[in-house]
Amino acid sequence: MERRLLLLLWLTLPGLCAPTLRSQVVVLQEDGVVCGDGEIQGQEECDDGGTAQGDGCSSQCEVELGWECSGVPSSCSGVCGDARVASSTEKCDDGNTQDGDGCSGNCTLVEPGWRCGSDQSWEHRRHLTELLKQPTAFPGLAGGCEPMCGDKLVVGDEECDDGNSQPGDGCGPDCKIEQGWAVGHQGKCCHLIECGDGIPDSGEECDDGNQQSGDGCTHQCQVEWGFTCVLGPAGKSICKPVCGDGIRAGMERCDDGNTADGDGCSGACQHEPGWHCDQPVSGASKCVQTVCGDSVVMEPEQCDDGNLAPGDGCSDKCQVETGWRCQAAIALPHQIGQILQTVQGESSCDAICGDRVQVGKEECDDGNRRSADGCSSECLLESGWSCDNDGCHLTVVN
């Protein structure tokens, strides 16, 4: 049996008129080495100058479990990451030195939203007992951590945390999303999954706040062909056509499968001046240059009267002039370049009588189609009248 001798040392402090006593307990080991004198000798693993237990260096000068000691006299501190809460400086120890799992990387902080156990004190004894049944995951007296469900902080494996443990509100007592519910934008909890509520949820490719198709997001909250949808600042899907994908969608006037300008369909998928693009049921748009004056009306032409003369109702740019109306001939299939298009034939244009714009064969235009007011219903000057920009007046005969 090991023999130890406790020595009570009486020391007299110099410079005092009367002796003052100070005592120190040391342990004399069997080999004569004194534990507690601050010197590391023999088989001592440490010596911190004392023989108190629980400070890292035991009464037999052995390093206690969960501690590490260095220097002479020894200075001891807890080992962070060994799954033991050993020193007063450690608030937790989950067996690693990583942040974000409940116990900080230096074992000095229980992170917000978590609760951690220790081998000294822990109010959640039930949880500690469960941890001790898993020695491979938490060796020894572990300081493992778990999320605190019900504190409104979503951490660890929590899917939600609405600040309570009540079921039926979307977030269950175990902080898992309940069936038919979802977490909203920026983790806001919780709402029923419903297409058209402006919150893209599980199973929804998009949700633009309505149940209308044709705007990029269908009535079933799926992205439509030719569109792309992204999450907007408020959490609602923002959908827009994909120009250059060969699918004409949304406000696109054409889509020829590229975003190059100068080929009839611009980089913004709009018609370019002097070009016509078809509108296929599927596939990319085909575009051909239009020729004003060829008696064929093709968009963006408004008319084509077979000439480039202005002042006859259809301008040299094949646009309807002010004061005129133009009507094209019957639509017929017509091959133009690579497009077989049903187009309108040559335009015939007539002046619009009654619009206060005198053009063509009109002798006057007083803004109406009544006769006997100087300008007839056919915009011809009536006998005994004269008309100018101020209107029509009876001619005074001397």
Image (tube, rainbow, N blue to C red):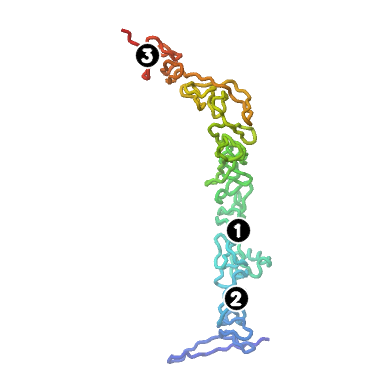
Q: Nearer the viewer, mark 1 or mark 2?
A: 2
Task: Find the distance from the CA under tag 3 to the CA under tag 1.
Answer: 92 Å
Task: Find the distance from the CA under tag 3 to the CA under tag 2.
Answer: 117 Å
Residue in front for this viewpoint, 254 or 168: 254
Amino acid of disc 1: Gly
Q: Nearer the viewer, mark 3 or mark 1?
A: 3
Amino acid of disc 3: Ser
Relative to 40, is 135 above or below?
above
* Lower sequence index among marks 3 and 1: 1
Report which residue position mark 2 lands on: 68
Residue in front for this viewpoint, 332 or 169: 332
Residue 392 located left or right of residue 159: left
Which numbered marker is on residue 386? 3
Task: Find the distance from the CA under tag 1 to the CA under tag 2.
Answer: 30 Å
Whether residue 219 can be seen here = no
Amino acid of disc 2: Glu
Mark 2 crowdedness (10 Å alpha carbons): few <14, some 14-19, many ≥20: some
